Image (tube, rainbow, N blue to C red):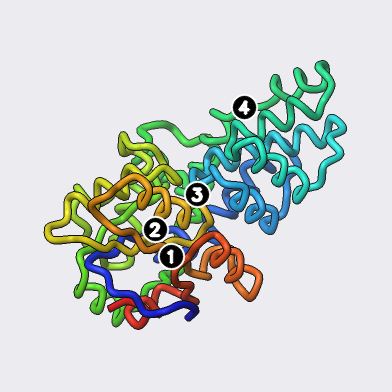
Protein backbone atom coordinates (compact mmCIF):
# COMPACT_ATOMS: atom_id res chain seq x y z
CA UNK A 1 0.00 0.00 0.00
CA UNK A 2 1.16 3.51 -0.82
CA UNK A 3 -0.16 6.70 0.75
CA UNK A 4 -1.51 7.61 4.18
CA UNK A 5 -4.44 6.02 5.99
CA UNK A 6 -7.57 8.09 5.36
CA UNK A 7 -10.82 8.31 7.30
CA UNK A 8 -13.94 8.11 5.14
CA UNK A 9 -17.66 7.67 5.74
CA UNK A 10 -18.47 5.79 2.54
CA UNK A 11 -16.84 3.81 -0.28
CA UNK A 12 -17.86 3.77 -3.93
CA UNK A 13 -16.42 0.89 -5.92
CA UNK A 14 -15.68 0.25 -9.56
CA UNK A 15 -16.26 -3.40 -10.53
CA UNK A 16 -13.89 -4.39 -13.33
CA UNK A 17 -10.31 -4.66 -12.21
CA UNK A 18 -11.38 -3.96 -8.62
CA UNK A 19 -13.89 -6.61 -7.56
CA UNK A 20 -13.55 -8.86 -10.63
CA UNK A 21 -10.49 -9.76 -12.73
CA UNK A 22 -11.44 -9.09 -16.36
CA UNK A 23 -8.16 -9.78 -18.16
CA UNK A 24 -9.55 -13.01 -19.66
CA UNK A 25 -13.10 -11.77 -20.14
CA UNK A 26 -13.75 -8.16 -21.11
CA UNK A 27 -10.22 -7.52 -22.31
CA UNK A 28 -10.18 -10.78 -24.21
CA UNK A 29 -13.54 -9.88 -25.78
CA UNK A 30 -12.13 -6.54 -26.96
CA UNK A 31 -9.30 -8.02 -29.00
CA UNK A 32 -11.18 -11.12 -30.19
CA UNK A 33 -14.19 -9.10 -31.37
CA UNK A 34 -11.94 -7.12 -33.69
CA UNK A 35 -10.31 -10.37 -34.86
CA UNK A 36 -13.70 -11.96 -35.47
CA UNK A 37 -14.98 -9.05 -37.56
CA UNK A 38 -11.83 -7.99 -39.42
CA UNK A 39 -9.48 -10.98 -39.35
CA UNK A 40 -6.72 -9.11 -37.53
CA UNK A 41 -6.38 -7.39 -34.18
CA UNK A 42 -3.99 -6.14 -31.51
CA UNK A 43 -2.60 -7.88 -28.43
CA UNK A 44 -4.25 -7.53 -25.03
CA UNK A 45 -1.25 -5.46 -23.94
CA UNK A 46 -2.45 -2.73 -26.34
CA UNK A 47 -5.59 -2.16 -24.29
CA UNK A 48 -3.92 -0.35 -21.40
CA UNK A 49 -2.48 2.50 -23.52
CA UNK A 50 -5.99 3.10 -24.86
CA UNK A 51 -7.37 3.10 -21.31
CA UNK A 52 -4.67 5.56 -20.25
CA UNK A 53 -5.69 7.92 -23.06
CA UNK A 54 -8.99 8.51 -21.18
CA UNK A 55 -12.55 8.18 -22.32
CA UNK A 56 -12.55 4.38 -22.68
CA UNK A 57 -14.52 3.33 -19.63
CA UNK A 58 -17.01 1.72 -22.02
CA UNK A 59 -15.39 -1.42 -23.43
CA UNK A 60 -17.71 -1.41 -26.45
CA UNK A 61 -16.36 1.99 -27.46
CA UNK A 62 -12.83 0.79 -26.72
CA UNK A 63 -13.44 -2.09 -29.14
CA UNK A 64 -14.74 0.35 -31.75
CA UNK A 65 -11.63 2.52 -31.37
CA UNK A 66 -9.23 -0.40 -31.64
CA UNK A 67 -11.05 -1.54 -34.78
CA UNK A 68 -10.56 1.96 -36.21
CA UNK A 69 -6.85 1.72 -35.46
CA UNK A 70 -6.55 -1.73 -37.09
CA UNK A 71 -8.43 -0.59 -40.19
CA UNK A 72 -6.35 2.57 -40.42
CA UNK A 73 -3.11 0.60 -40.13
CA UNK A 74 -4.27 -1.48 -43.07
CA UNK A 75 -4.67 1.78 -45.01
CA UNK A 76 -1.18 3.01 -44.24
CA UNK A 77 -1.43 4.66 -40.82
CA UNK A 78 2.17 4.85 -39.60
CA UNK A 79 1.51 5.49 -35.89
CA UNK A 80 2.32 2.68 -33.49
CA UNK A 81 -0.02 2.14 -30.53
CA UNK A 82 1.84 4.38 -28.03
CA UNK A 83 1.99 7.20 -30.58
CA UNK A 84 -1.63 6.72 -31.64
CA UNK A 85 -3.03 6.66 -28.11
CA UNK A 86 -0.93 9.68 -27.19
CA UNK A 87 -2.52 11.58 -30.08
CA UNK A 88 -5.95 10.34 -29.00
CA UNK A 89 -5.33 11.71 -25.50
CA UNK A 90 -4.27 15.09 -26.91
CA UNK A 91 -7.54 15.49 -28.84
CA UNK A 92 -9.73 14.56 -25.88
CA UNK A 93 -9.66 10.77 -25.64
CA UNK A 94 -12.38 8.23 -26.25
CA UNK A 95 -13.82 6.83 -29.44
CA UNK A 96 -14.31 10.29 -30.92
CA UNK A 97 -10.67 11.07 -30.25
CA UNK A 98 -9.62 7.90 -32.07
CA UNK A 99 -11.83 8.82 -35.00
CA UNK A 100 -10.33 12.31 -35.11
CA UNK A 101 -6.76 11.00 -35.16
CA UNK A 102 -7.57 8.51 -37.92
CA UNK A 103 -9.31 11.20 -39.96
CA UNK A 104 -6.37 13.58 -39.57
CA UNK A 105 -3.75 10.93 -40.38
CA UNK A 106 -5.12 9.48 -43.63
CA UNK A 107 -5.77 10.90 -47.05
CA UNK A 108 -9.47 11.34 -47.96
CA UNK A 109 -9.78 8.15 -49.97
CA UNK A 110 -8.18 5.97 -47.29
CA UNK A 111 -10.25 7.67 -44.60
CA UNK A 112 -13.43 6.91 -46.52
CA UNK A 113 -12.49 3.25 -46.89
CA UNK A 114 -11.83 2.95 -43.16
CA UNK A 115 -15.12 4.57 -42.16
CA UNK A 116 -17.04 2.47 -44.67
CA UNK A 117 -15.58 -0.74 -43.25
CA UNK A 118 -15.99 0.35 -39.63
CA UNK A 119 -19.09 -1.26 -38.11
CA UNK A 120 -19.54 -0.39 -34.40
CA UNK A 121 -22.94 -2.11 -34.18
CA UNK A 122 -21.59 -5.42 -35.46
CA UNK A 123 -18.55 -5.15 -33.19
CA UNK A 124 -20.79 -4.65 -30.16
CA UNK A 125 -22.98 -7.61 -31.10
CA UNK A 126 -19.96 -9.88 -31.51
CA UNK A 127 -18.44 -8.56 -28.28
CA UNK A 128 -21.57 -9.38 -26.30
CA UNK A 129 -21.82 -12.88 -27.70
CA UNK A 130 -18.16 -13.62 -26.97
CA UNK A 131 -18.41 -12.18 -23.48
CA UNK A 132 -21.80 -13.52 -22.40
CA UNK A 133 -21.94 -16.73 -24.40
CA UNK A 134 -24.77 -17.67 -26.73
CA UNK A 135 -27.28 -18.70 -24.07
CA UNK A 136 -26.88 -15.71 -21.78
CA UNK A 137 -26.69 -13.35 -24.76
CA UNK A 138 -30.10 -14.54 -25.95
CA UNK A 139 -31.55 -14.17 -22.44
CA UNK A 140 -30.26 -10.66 -21.81
CA UNK A 141 -30.60 -9.22 -25.31
CA UNK A 142 -33.76 -11.00 -26.47
CA UNK A 143 -31.99 -11.76 -29.74
CA UNK A 144 -30.79 -14.84 -31.57
CA UNK A 145 -27.08 -15.53 -31.21
CA UNK A 146 -25.12 -15.90 -34.43
CA UNK A 147 -22.07 -17.39 -32.70
CA UNK A 148 -21.86 -20.62 -30.72
CA UNK A 149 -19.91 -19.49 -27.65
CA UNK A 150 -19.69 -20.48 -23.99
CA UNK A 151 -18.86 -16.94 -22.81
CA UNK A 152 -15.79 -15.32 -21.31
CA UNK A 153 -17.94 -14.15 -18.39
CA UNK A 154 -17.24 -17.52 -16.80
CA UNK A 155 -13.49 -16.74 -16.76
CA UNK A 156 -13.65 -13.89 -14.23
CA UNK A 157 -11.87 -14.62 -10.95
CA UNK A 158 -13.30 -12.82 -7.93
CA UNK A 159 -10.75 -10.45 -6.39
CA UNK A 160 -12.73 -9.57 -3.26
CA UNK A 161 -12.03 -12.02 -0.43
CA UNK A 162 -14.95 -12.94 1.88
CA UNK A 163 -13.16 -11.51 4.93
CA UNK A 164 -12.70 -8.18 3.13
CA UNK A 165 -16.34 -8.19 2.04
CA UNK A 166 -17.38 -8.57 5.68
CA UNK A 167 -15.15 -5.68 6.75
CA UNK A 168 -16.64 -3.41 4.08
CA UNK A 169 -19.88 -3.53 6.08
CA UNK A 170 -18.29 -0.84 8.28
CA UNK A 171 -18.95 1.71 5.52
CA UNK A 172 -21.86 2.77 3.38
CA UNK A 173 -21.24 1.35 -0.10
CA UNK A 174 -21.99 2.37 -3.66
CA UNK A 175 -20.96 1.21 -7.14
CA UNK A 176 -20.07 3.26 -10.24
CA UNK A 177 -19.21 1.01 -13.20
CA UNK A 178 -19.16 1.07 -16.96
CA UNK A 179 -20.84 -2.36 -17.09
CA UNK A 180 -24.39 -2.69 -18.38
CA UNK A 181 -26.83 -3.10 -15.51
CA UNK A 182 -27.50 -6.82 -15.97
CA UNK A 183 -23.78 -7.60 -16.08
CA UNK A 184 -23.17 -5.48 -12.99
CA UNK A 185 -25.83 -7.48 -11.15
CA UNK A 186 -24.17 -10.75 -12.16
CA UNK A 187 -20.78 -9.51 -10.91
CA UNK A 188 -22.11 -8.19 -7.61
CA UNK A 189 -23.98 -11.45 -6.98
CA UNK A 190 -20.77 -13.34 -7.65
CA UNK A 191 -18.75 -11.32 -5.15
CA UNK A 192 -21.57 -11.32 -2.61
CA UNK A 193 -22.18 -7.58 -2.35
CA UNK A 194 -25.65 -6.12 -1.96
CA UNK A 195 -25.76 -2.50 -3.14
CA UNK A 196 -28.92 -0.39 -2.91
CA UNK A 197 -30.34 0.35 -6.35
CA UNK A 198 -30.05 4.11 -5.89
CA UNK A 199 -26.33 3.67 -5.16
CA UNK A 200 -25.47 1.49 -8.17
CA UNK A 201 -24.72 3.41 -11.37
CA UNK A 202 -24.06 1.47 -14.57
CA UNK A 203 -23.87 2.01 -18.31
CA UNK A 204 -27.68 1.98 -18.31
CA UNK A 205 -27.97 4.90 -15.88
CA UNK A 206 -28.95 8.26 -17.39
CA UNK A 207 -25.91 10.04 -15.95
CA UNK A 208 -22.70 10.49 -17.99
CA UNK A 209 -19.97 7.90 -17.67
CA UNK A 210 -16.54 8.43 -16.12
CA UNK A 211 -14.65 10.70 -15.83
CA UNK A 212 -17.81 12.83 -15.46
CA UNK A 213 -18.53 13.09 -11.72
CA UNK A 214 -22.33 13.22 -11.82
CA UNK A 215 -23.02 9.65 -10.74
CA UNK A 216 -20.42 9.74 -7.98
CA UNK A 217 -21.94 12.95 -6.61
CA UNK A 218 -25.46 11.50 -6.77
CA UNK A 219 -24.36 8.41 -4.86
CA UNK A 220 -22.81 10.58 -2.15
CA UNK A 221 -25.98 12.68 -1.93
CA UNK A 222 -28.05 9.53 -1.34
CA UNK A 223 -26.02 8.58 1.73
CA UNK A 224 -27.12 9.92 5.11
CA UNK A 225 -24.53 11.75 7.21
CA UNK A 226 -21.86 11.20 4.58
CA UNK A 227 -19.11 13.78 4.23
CA UNK A 228 -16.05 11.92 2.90
CA UNK A 229 -16.24 9.31 0.13
CA UNK A 230 -13.49 7.04 -1.19
CA UNK A 231 -13.82 6.19 -4.88
CA UNK A 232 -11.90 3.01 -5.65
CA UNK A 233 -10.91 2.28 -9.24
CA UNK A 234 -8.19 0.81 -11.43
CA UNK A 235 -7.88 3.41 -14.21
CA UNK A 236 -6.74 6.98 -14.59
CA UNK A 237 -10.31 7.92 -15.49
CA UNK A 238 -11.43 6.64 -12.07
CA UNK A 239 -8.92 8.90 -10.34
CA UNK A 240 -9.98 11.85 -12.49
CA UNK A 241 -13.62 11.18 -11.67
CA UNK A 242 -12.97 11.68 -7.96
CA UNK A 243 -11.06 14.91 -8.62
CA UNK A 244 -13.86 16.17 -10.87
CA UNK A 245 -16.34 15.40 -8.09
CA UNK A 246 -14.30 17.51 -5.66
CA UNK A 247 -14.45 20.40 -8.10
CA UNK A 248 -18.20 19.98 -8.60
CA UNK A 249 -19.60 19.11 -5.17
CA UNK A 250 -19.04 21.46 -2.24
CA UNK A 251 -20.92 19.23 0.21
CA UNK A 252 -18.63 16.19 0.13
CA UNK A 253 -14.93 15.34 -0.07
CA UNK A 254 -13.88 12.62 -2.50
CA UNK A 255 -10.75 10.53 -1.94
CA UNK A 256 -9.37 8.82 -5.09
CA UNK A 257 -8.02 5.34 -4.40
CA UNK A 258 -6.17 3.36 -7.06
CA UNK A 259 -5.87 -0.44 -7.17
CA UNK A 260 -3.26 -2.38 -9.11
CA UNK A 261 -5.41 -5.36 -10.13
CA UNK A 262 -6.62 -3.75 -13.36
CA UNK A 263 -3.92 -2.91 -15.88
CA UNK A 264 -1.84 -0.38 -13.96
CA UNK A 265 0.49 -2.32 -11.71
CA UNK A 266 4.09 -2.58 -10.65
CA UNK A 267 6.25 0.46 -10.08
CA UNK A 268 5.20 2.14 -13.33
CA UNK A 269 1.50 1.56 -12.73
CA UNK A 270 1.65 2.80 -9.15
CA UNK A 271 3.46 5.91 -10.31
CA UNK A 272 0.88 6.62 -13.01
CA UNK A 273 -1.94 6.32 -10.49
CA UNK A 274 -0.09 8.53 -8.01
CA UNK A 275 0.75 11.11 -10.67
CA UNK A 276 -2.94 11.20 -11.64
CA UNK A 277 -3.73 12.14 -8.05
CA UNK A 278 -4.55 8.90 -6.25
CA UNK A 279 -4.48 9.62 -2.53
CA UNK A 280 -3.84 5.94 -1.83
CA UNK A 281 -2.65 3.09 -4.06
CA UNK A 282 -3.33 -0.48 -2.93
CA UNK A 283 -2.24 -3.75 -4.49
CA UNK A 284 -5.79 -5.10 -4.33
CA UNK A 285 -9.23 -4.42 -2.90
CA UNK A 286 -8.28 -6.63 0.04
CA UNK A 287 -5.88 -3.96 1.34
CA UNK A 288 -8.66 -1.38 1.44
CA UNK A 289 -9.86 -1.91 5.02
CA UNK A 290 -6.30 -1.34 6.23
CA UNK A 291 -5.93 1.84 4.17
CA UNK A 292 -9.23 3.38 5.28
CA UNK A 293 -10.64 4.03 8.72
What residue is disc 2 on?
A: 14
Say few, some or many: other residues with alpha carbon within 10 Å of mark 2 (under 14 / 14 to 19 / 20 or more).
many
Residues tagged 1 and 2 counted as in contact (Cβ below 8 A): yes
Label ID, residue 18: 1
Which residue lies at the image location 62% right of the left edge and 27% below the top edge? Answer: 119
Image coordinates of residue 153 in percent, x first then y, are 46, 56
Above or below, 175 against 62 in this view is below
Find the distance from the CA under tag 3 to the CA under tag 2. 19 Å
Say few, some or many: other residues with alpha carbon within 10 Å of mark 3 (under 14 / 14 to 19 / 20 or more).
many
Q: Is residue 148 visible?
A: no
- Say which of marks 4 and 3 sits in front: 4
Find the distance from the CA under tag 1 to the CA under tag 2. 6 Å
Find the distance from the CA under tag 1 to the CA under tag 4. 31 Å
Find the distance from the CA under tag 4 to the CA under tag 2. 29 Å
Decide if residue 190 is on the left or right side of residue 55: left
Which residue lies at the image location 50% right of the left edge and 62% below the top edge? Answer: 277
Label ID, residue 131: 3
Amino acid sequence: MEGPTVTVDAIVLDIDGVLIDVHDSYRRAVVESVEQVYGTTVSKSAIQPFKNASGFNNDWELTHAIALYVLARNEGLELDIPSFTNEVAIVGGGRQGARTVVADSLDPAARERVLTAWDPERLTTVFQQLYLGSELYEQLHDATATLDTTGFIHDEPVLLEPSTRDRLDDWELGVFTGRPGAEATIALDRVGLEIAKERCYTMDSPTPGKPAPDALCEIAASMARCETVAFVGDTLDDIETAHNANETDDDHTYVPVGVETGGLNGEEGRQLLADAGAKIVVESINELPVALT
